[in-house]
Image (cartoon, rainbow, N blue to C red):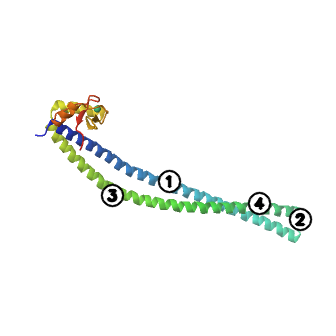
Amino acid sequence: MPSELSNLLRLSALDTTLSKLAREVVATERSVVNQASHLEELERNIAAANKKQKLLLEAEQSCNRKMRRYQSMIETGNTALERGLGDAASALKQVRQCTSILDELENQTLDLIEQQEHLAASRVTTIQASEQARQELQTLRDSVETSLTELAGQQQQRAAERKQLRSTMDVELLDRYDLMQSRKGSAVARIHNNACQSCNQTVARHQIQELRQERLEVCRGCSRWLAPALG
Ligand SMILES: [Zn+2]
């Protein structure tokens, strides 16, 4: 029959494994959430780029309309000048003003076209990134499902072992164990270099002797049960 000490150590090891498994489950689930929000961000960027592209195109079209208007005003002015109709000075002034506005509009149009080209290039990059992210998310979802099933299996198995083990242990010992676990996070501390690994308190030689006899010893520093040094 296993000693109280060996049961305690096994229980402590099982609890450590169980909390590690629980953390793994959380981290695994979080990885999917993170990847999904990464994808959402890329999709928002694409939507914003689409919207901006539409605005730039509208601005370009408006510039083109204005350019056509000024072009025709210039033509009207030139015709008047050629035919010697009306006030030549004011016709010349109109042609000059319109030409200057037209130049300005041409510059604006070129700038808008350039902006659209830049935007189109970055939009392509974002679309590629989002397609990749979508594929990664799918791969991740598949692998996560497998991992979670595997983790759940391990959790179930360890929980059953734990339950079985606890049923063979002293109730008062378990009460103290549970209290220590909840208050300090661990009820057992390993000895390392003749000191408690949790609180660094030196462990008396007679305590080490007692442990060799499979008897329970409590750390004088942190009140955890002591576990013999490894190796
Ligand atoms: Zn200690």
Alpha carbon distance from label 1 to label 2: 57 Å
Apparent side of residue 75 relative to residue 142 in the rendered image (left or right): right
Toward which corner of the image does residue 181 lie, by quadrant?
top left
Mark toward the start of the polypeptide (3 vs 1): 1
Residue 40 place in picture, x, y as percent: 45, 53
- Secondary structure of residue under mark 1: helix
Alpha carbon distance from label 4 to label 2: 20 Å
- Secondary structure of residue under mark 4: helix
Q: Quadrant of ligand 1?
A: top left
Mark toward the start of the polypeptide (1 vs 2): 1
Residue topped by disc 3: 142
Query: Looking at the figure, which quarter contains the N terminus?
Result: top left
Alpha carbon distance from label 3 to label 1: 25 Å
Residue depth check, mark 3 versus mark 1: number of the one nearer the observer: 3
Alpha carbon distance from label 4 to label 1: 38 Å
Residue depth check, mark 4 versus mark 2: number of the one nearer the observer: 4
> Dot 2: within a 10 Å radius of its alpha carbon, few (fewer than 14), some, or many (20 or more) residues?
some
With respect to residue 118, does 34 lie above or below?
A: above
Residue topped by disc 2: 88
Query: Looking at the figure, which quarter contains the C terminus?
Result: top left
Residue depth check, mark 4 versus mark 3: number of the one nearer the observer: 3
Mark 3 vs ligand 1: CB below 8 Å? no
Residue 87 visible: no
Residue topped by disc 4: 101
Q: In terms of depth relative to the viewer, which is nearer, 166 or 211?
A: 211
- Secondary structure of residue under mark 2: helix
Residue 10 visible: yes
Apparent side of residue 113 relative to residue 48 in the rendered image (left or right): right
Residue topped by disc 1: 44
The amino acid type of the residue labelled 4 equals Ile
The amino acid type of the residue labelled 3 equals Asp
